[in-house]
Amino acid sequence: MITMDDIIREGNPALRAVAKEVSVPLSDEDIKLGEEMMEFLHNSQDPIKAEELGLRGGVGLAAPQLDISKRIIAVHVPSGDLENPEPTLSAVMYNPKILSHSVQDACLGEGEGCLSVDREVPGYVVRHNKITLSYVDAAGVKQKIRLKNYEAIVVQHEIDHLNGVMFYDHINQENPYALKDGVLVIE
Ligand SMILES: CC(C)(C)[C@H](NC(=O)Nc1cc(F)cc(F)c1)C(=O)N(CC(=O)NO)CC1CCCC1
Ligand SMILES: [Zn+2]
């Protein structure tokens, strides 16, 4: 089972490498890894298990954060309201690729953090507001989906990890809260 000890932290050069595509059909090993990554996210969002295992509540995880240089990400975005426990996005994505994106940019009003970064780095992380994404799912089926707002931000954050990019690489060094006109601030 994946715990925080398995997650490498900034400074580890493996976080700056470009990860390799996985072969399709998926190997049992890659399918198992994806299942373990999703299990980590579920455990991290379960108050009891998170406390027991000392996990930070995670919405996304990329294989390079486990020192595995493969283009695999897992995302699990809870719905946010207790009435509707259905997550708004829950998927293990193999070889995810952004096919196209909106002109409209967006950022989280709270800025971003990272499971591999044990410090606060303030500032807006400007990303695409909407993306069209292709990936191979855990069943080996090619998917093409459109995402927007928070879900799109999470997936872009995870795909960045596959390219050795950290969220703070996007923050304006002169003025971390500088915003061009028209950037949507997502609260
Ligand atoms: C770094 C951390 C603060 C743990 C961040 N979680 C988060 O932003 N909030 C959160 C946590 C939950 F459990 C449920 C929930 F709806 C929201 C996160 O998981 N990531 C993922 C990551 O580090 N992947 O490599 C960072 C987020 C910043 C913007 C998108 C992902
Ligand atoms: Zn991260």
Image (cartoon, grey):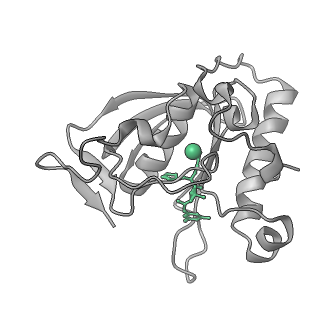
User: Which residue is at 50% across, 37% downward?
Assistant: 166
Q: Position of residue 44 (x, y in %)?
A: 72, 63
The vertical placement of 158 against 12, above or below, is below
The quadrant the C terminus occupies is bottom left
User: Which residue is at 80% across, 37% downward?
Assistant: 33
Front residue of this view, candidates 64 and 36 = 64
Q: Position of residue 98 (x, y in %)?
A: 42, 29
For the image, the number of numbered tags is 0
Quadrant in the picture for residue 162: top right
Q: In the image, 180: left or right of 150?
A: left
Q: Is residue 92 visible?
A: no
The vertical placement of 180 against 137, above or below, is below
User: Which residue is at 70% across, 29% downward?
Assistant: 140
Front residue of this view, candidates 85 and 124 = 124
User: Which residue is at 39% across, 57% downward?
Assistant: 111
The residue at the far left in this view is 181
Q: In the image, 59: left or right of 138?
A: left
The vertical placement of 87 against 101, above or below, is below
Q: Position of residue 146 (x, y in %)?
A: 40, 42
Q: Position of residue 31 (x, y in %)?
A: 80, 34
Front residue of this view, candidates 92 and 159 = 159
Q: Is residue 16 visible?
A: yes
The residue at the far bottom in this view is 83
Q: In the image, 31: left or right of 151?
A: right
The vertical placement of 36 against 23, above or below, is below
Quadrant in the picture for residue 138: top right
Front residue of this view, candidates 61 and 149 = 61
Q: Quadrant of ligand 1?
A: bottom right
